[in-house]
Image (cartoon, rainbow, N blue to C red):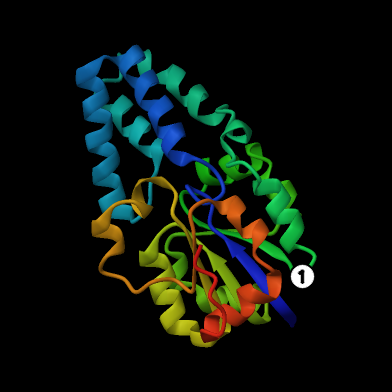
Amino acid sequence: MHPVVFLFDVDNTLLDNDRFELDLRHNLEWKLGTEREARYWAIYEQLRAELGYADYLAALQRLRLEDIHDQRPLGLFSFLLDYPFADRLYPGVLDLLSHVSRSGPTVIVSDGDAVFQPRKIHRSGLSAAVEGRVVIYLHKDRELADIEARYPAQHYVLIDDKPGILTPMKEAWGSRVTTVFPRQGHYAHDPANTEKYPPADVTVEHIADLLDIELPVLATAAAGDADADH
């Protein structure tokens, strides 16, 4: 039982996934053309609605099956699997992970598929930065019992760019968790994804801003006895 465990999301929390998607869009348009690129994203959104998470590889595979004689999608598999995610880490991320690890274990807790998401976390260097403590779920907000079993703690600090994830985990854990909302990425700046949820215990503009907050504050903020809104 650790005094505190730090749970970090990945996409648009530790690394700039919006920038990755922009690069993917450019490559899709360049290699497939506008019409096929649009078809890829239609399949992608359909799969996300079915699965509840993004699956870039499955969308590409389904696109390929629609025209098995079109060889162009094949090169995009390499683009996805070999993408330089280490170059997309937000500034200060590795320093932050090292900093907070002095107070408790750091854990990557992400949603995603079983191939691309683990590879992204590995290639970005994040897996090594948290000493391999990585768990990937279909819906992590429904897996609190499993998180507690794997990483028991008196208190958790949850860092995620999606209020829709922070809120249900706060409702379940109450004062046992400090929720941290870095306002990064398109989810964090879309009123449709923010205004319907209560504010997090701690809000920062950039993930590296957490380096300026004393670690004990992240624990006490859950009880409302620290003003950590930056």
Q: Position of residue 40 (x, y in %)?
A: 27, 30
Q: Out of 94 and 83, give the one closest to the viewer.
A: 94
In the picture, measured across the screen, residue 140 lies left or right of residue 54, that is right
> Is residue 137 shown above or below 91?
below
> Is residue 180 shown above or below 183?
below
Instruction: Determine which residue is flagged by label 1.
Output: 103
At label 1, the amino acid type is Ser
> Crowding at label 1, few (<14), some or many (≥20) Cα neighbours within 10 Å?
some
Residue shown at 55% from the left, 28% from the top: 83
Which of the image's four quarters has the N terminus? bottom right
User: Can residue 45 be seen by looking at this rendering?
Assistant: yes
Q: For residue 100, what is the image quadrant? A: bottom right
Q: For residue 214, what is the image quadrant? A: bottom right
User: Can residue 151 be seen by looking at this rendering?
Assistant: no
Q: How many marks?
A: 1
In the picture, measured across the screen, residue 123 lies left or right of residue 31, that is right
Q: Position of residue 50 (x, y in %)?
A: 27, 53
Q: Out of 221 and 138, give the one closest to the viewer.
A: 221
Q: Out of 104 and 48, give the one closest to the viewer.
A: 104
Outermost residue on the right side: it is 102
Q: For residue 22, what is the image quadrant? A: top left
In the picture, measured across the screen, residue 205 lies left or right of residue 102, that is left
Residue shown at 48% from the left, 74% from the top: 201
Q: Position of residue 15 (x, y in %)?
A: 54, 43
Q: Disc 1 on helix, strand or loop?
A: loop
> Is residue 47 shown above or below 226?
above
Residue shown at 38% from the left, 46% from the top: 54
